[in-house]
Amino acid sequence: MGQSGSMKKNVIWNTCGSIFYSVCQWLLTSIIIRTASYEAGGILSLAMTASSSFSAISLFSMRNYQVSDIKGEYSVNEYVGSRVITCAAAFVCCAAAAVYNSSVEQMLCIDAFMLVRVAEAWVDVMHGVDQKYERYDYIGKSYILRGMITLIIFCAGLFFTGNLTLTLCVMALGNLAAAVCYDTRMTGALEQITPVFQKRVLQLLKTCIPIVVFTFLLSLENLIPKKILEQQYGQADLGIYSAMANLAVVVQVFSSVVFNPFLPRFTQLYYSGDLDGFRKALHKLYLILAGMCAVVNAGVFIFGKLGLKILYGEDILQYYDLFLPIIWCTIFTALIWIISAILIALRKIRLLVAGMIVDFALCLLLAEPLIERYNKNGVSIVQIAVMGIYILFMIVVCEISINKSNIKRQVAKDEKINNNTGV
């Protein structure tokens, strides 16, 4: 199917491109803090975080469902048609929410960055098709192109205008142009792209609504503590926290995108009935993730202070105690994305959502008192506590699901033997 290539090559393209794009976005906060102020960094950070929350609507959490759709439940154009609907809905919802409790500058910055999220969502469904044909080179080049556009326009815009809002608007238009002119054209060469809006598209959206609820609540677990921090201590403290948090996002992206090419393999093992192979692959994944956590923590202890000093200057080191808890928040978020992809492939979506609803309620209960007590570190402590509980819940669901499938398989096998022997 499509270009044949080694899994190693696929992982390299997917990982390098995704990390490059994420680093370019992360550098935006570093640049604005270096050239302007922590207050400006706070405005940008809130725009990025708020738009990220509504990107749950534009993405509709459909990528993992699309990639694991090895039986062809829905066509490519049904996935594309649904994305047109979700992108429009996400922008309208974000624009409406941005009006609430925001200055005009903050509102416009949120709207502009939401257009960047819309471009990301459109590209995401194109990448789902690219992945089907194993064209990870298209995916990697797309990330690199949009990363360069983002960084170049942002730097040039601030240099020539000094206006953050105008700069973000131009940057958004650049990302939309890349999504249409590069991604749509390249993916269209693999398979004709003609969005459809028939009844089955609504059925697809209905199927994915629980996944959207999960993604949206997970993103709010990140947004709400930050918003409480801003309300209690101001935009400057939010800017300081966000400067370190944005650095840690690279770890999250790396762990997530490295796993992405392997998801179809997990799906094939499960639906082919090779449950022993699936279990071994899953346990190997747990070990890899544990190793990743150890490596990241070692890197923070060795290079953390030096990296922060180079990027943000000597002043940031007085807040170094924030860094390790932020790293753990990032690692836990990455683990949730990876293990949730497995549960979506297993179609254990209701359990995924039910667990997240309880977890989100716990976040709401703990956020304000912990932030009031621990200041900026309270944001991390809240997330570490609730996400740690949720990760354990997901692992338990995975193991129980495999055991149940094994039991069903054994019962079916015994019944078949009994029927054949006339017992």
Image (cartoon, rainbow, N blue to C red):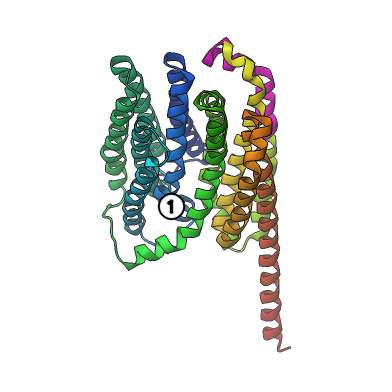
Q: Is residue 318 visible?
A: yes
Q: Quadrant of residue 303?
A: top right
Q: Quadrant of residue 185?
A: top left
The residue beneath circle 1 is 60
**Residue 50, image x and y in percent?**
45, 39
Q: Say which quadrant the C terminus sits in.
A: bottom right
Q: Main secondary structure of the magenta part?
A: helix
Is 344 on the left-hand or right-hand side of 285?
left
Nearest the camera: 37 or 398?
37
Q: Eyeballing the image, is 68 above or below 162?
A: below
Residue located at (53% from left, 44% from top): 220
Q: Eyeballing the image, is 107 above or below 59?
A: above
**Residue 261, image x and y in percent?**
51, 44
Is 222 on the left-hand or right-hand side of 98?
right
Q: Which secondary structure, mark 1?
A: loop
Farthest right residue in view = 423
Residue 298: say if magenta.
yes
Farthest top residue in view = 314
Farthest bottom residue in view = 422
Nearest the camera: 42 or 63?
42
Nearest the camera: 93 or 390?
93
Residue 121: say if magenta.
no
Residue located at (34% from left, 45% from top): 91
Q: Which residues are magenta?
A: 293-314
Is 113 on the left-hand or right-hand side of 195?
right
Label 1 sits on what residue type? Phe
